[in-house]
């Protein structure tokens, strides 16, 4: 799955960590969850009959003139393809916007960008909205809404340009604000988020099919809640900009002030009739991935703890806590006896102070590598395969990533050493200090990517076809 394989992935502990992550991602793939949760009877050669089952709920396809798919997000294309395979000729078309396009029968799969929106996202979303407005009471809308939809489903309010929206997105992602606060802003500068897509589709009935990338799986937060009632307001959105010192374009601030003044309509609430016409089904969550990772570690012979599927806060600080747990396992056998594994999920954040390259999972891994002193392996990835604005999913590190007896290598490939005439023990200590100082400097500059790249620690998978947030595995061997 990861190519090339980092050196840390070749040990038993490393192999187990990466196999657990791969199992977690596979368990949350659209193809997997559709196989488990959705079925259609009487479709195929007889398009006039059919019953759609989603979990325990059943829907009579005979009651509708057409069945279409409308949605967006990292996994929306693959979810649309899985639905097309299930429904066969009973599916009449639709539009999804994704950064991982795949053929999906009669559904138009339009490619956009993530995590920062571009004109391609806007064009695809406008096409989706036109199709939504054509729906009526005789149309059943299947709506795949997945992680990444906040960027991919982009319909800026009239006063805001795509470039201004991209600038706002960059500033929000760099602010360290939690995703629900970020999305409160996104909803109020958009014509599709915060329940507005539900209004465009009404009066057609909607089945929301969610793959969640947020810690509490709240439909109002996933992809900024295009089908869900919005509990936030223009005033809340403006408060986020102030509280997190977000450098937002003037057009955004003017729009929010106009909303506070009552000159723009608020987003729909949960009581809005259009929102009440949506039936939501959460098909996969971070806990789906965590459970599969736990099962894999246990099968490999490791006593395993699911720490939490809701870890949040600064990535570098969360890493210190998990390293401390690994140290306690090693030293006291609590809460587990080694060989042991600790699995966690959730979504950590990064408050950007430097101008380096990396992502939350790379910062988590680098912070862990700095802290590790006992034998342990730590792997952390974003399940969509893209951690921050990089081509890495995350990283895998051990106590050797910031080694005790090796001088640091510099950006030009040369080696930084101490005084060549110094005794060997002094040179080893100097080498450790060099590497440790460089690692700390990179972390301070939010520049984990180049350090981890040089240490052969990056995990590169490409887009995985799903997005259920971060997944981490800590292995403490015997």
Image: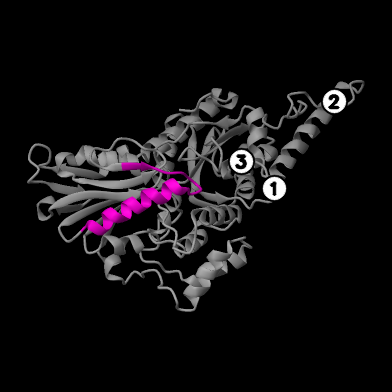
Quadrant position of the N terminus in the picture: top left
- Residue on which the image places disc 1: 354
Q: Earlier in the sequence, mark 3 or mark 2?
A: 3
- Residue on which the image places disc 3: 358
Give the CA separation, mark 2 to mark 1: 31 Å
Crowding near the residue tagged with mark 2, few <14, some 14–19, many ≥20 C-alpha atoms within 10 Å: some
| Magenta span of residues | 109-135
Q: Of all residues shown, which one is farthest toward the right?
A: 421
Q: Element under label 3? A: loop
- Residue on which the image places disc 2: 427
Q: Position of residue 52 (x, y in %)?
A: 17, 48
Give the CA separation, mark 3 to mark 2: 30 Å
Compared with 360, 225 (above or below) is below
Q: Of all residues shown, which one is farthest toward the bottom?
A: 261
Compared with 447, 6 (above or below) is above
Compared with 361, 63 (above or below) is below
Name the mark nearer the viewer: 3 or 2. Answer: 3
Q: Nearer the viewer, residue 265 or 77?
A: 265
């Amino acid at each position: 799955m990861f190519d090339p394989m980092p050196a840390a992935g070749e040990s038993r502990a490393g192999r187990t960590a990466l196999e657990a992550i791969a199992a977690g991602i596979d368990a949350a793939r659209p193809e997997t969850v559709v196989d488990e949760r959705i079925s259609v009877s009487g479709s195929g050669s007889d398009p006039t009959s059919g019953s759609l089952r989603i979990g325990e709920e059943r829907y009579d396809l005979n009651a509708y003139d057409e069945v279409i798919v409308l949605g967006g997000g990292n996994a929306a294309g693959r979810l649309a393809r899985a639905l097309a395979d299930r429904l066969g000729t009973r599916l009449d078309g639709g539009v999804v916007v994704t950064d991982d396009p795949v053929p999906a029968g009669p559904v138009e799969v339009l490619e956009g960008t993530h995590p920062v929106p571009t004109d391609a996202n806007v064009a695809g979303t406008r096409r989706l909205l036109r199709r939504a407005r054509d729906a009526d009471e005789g149309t059943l809308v299947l709506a795949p809404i997945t992680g990444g939809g906040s960027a991919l489903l982009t319909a800026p309010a009239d006063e805001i340009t795509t470039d201004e929206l991209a600038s706002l997105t960059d500033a929000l992602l760099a602010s360290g604000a939690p995703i629900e606060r970020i999305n409160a802003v996104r909803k109020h500068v958009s014509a599709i988020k915060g329940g507005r897509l539900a209004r465009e589709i009404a009066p057609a009935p909607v089945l929301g099919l969610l793959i969640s990338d947020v810690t509490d799986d709240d439909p109002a937060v996933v992809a900024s809640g295009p089908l869900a009632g919005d509990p936030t307001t223009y005033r809340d959105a403006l408060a986020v900009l102030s509280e997190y010192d977000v450098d937002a374009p003037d057009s955004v601030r003017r729009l929010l002030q106009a909303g506070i003044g009552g000159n723009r309509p608020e987003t729909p609430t949960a009581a809005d009739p259009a929102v009440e016409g949506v039936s939501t089904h959460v098909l996969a969550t971070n806990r789906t991935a965590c459970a599969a990772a736990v099962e894999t570690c246990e099968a490999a012979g490791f006593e395993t703890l699911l720490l939490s599927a809701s870890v949040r806060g600064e990535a570098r600080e969360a890493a210190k806590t998990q390293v401390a747990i690994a140290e306690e396992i090693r030293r006291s056998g609590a809460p587990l006896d080694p060989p042991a594994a600790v699995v966690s999920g959730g979504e950590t954040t990064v408050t950007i102070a430097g101008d380096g390259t990396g992502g939350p999972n790379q910062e988590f891994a680098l912070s862990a590598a700095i802290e590790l002193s006992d034998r342990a392996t730590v792997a952390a990835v974003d399940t969509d395969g893209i951690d921050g604005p990089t081509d890495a999913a995350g990283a895998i590190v051990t106590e050797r990533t910031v080694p005790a007896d090796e001088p640091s290598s510099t950006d030009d490939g040369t080696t930084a050493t101490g005084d060549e005439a110094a005794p060997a023990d002094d040179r080893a200590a100097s080498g450790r200090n060099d590497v440790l100082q460089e690692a700390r400097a990179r972390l301070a500059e939010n520049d984990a990517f180049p350090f981890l790249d040089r240490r052969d620690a990056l995990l590169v998978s490409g887009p995985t076809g799903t997005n259920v947030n971060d997944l981490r595995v800590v292995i403490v061997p015997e």
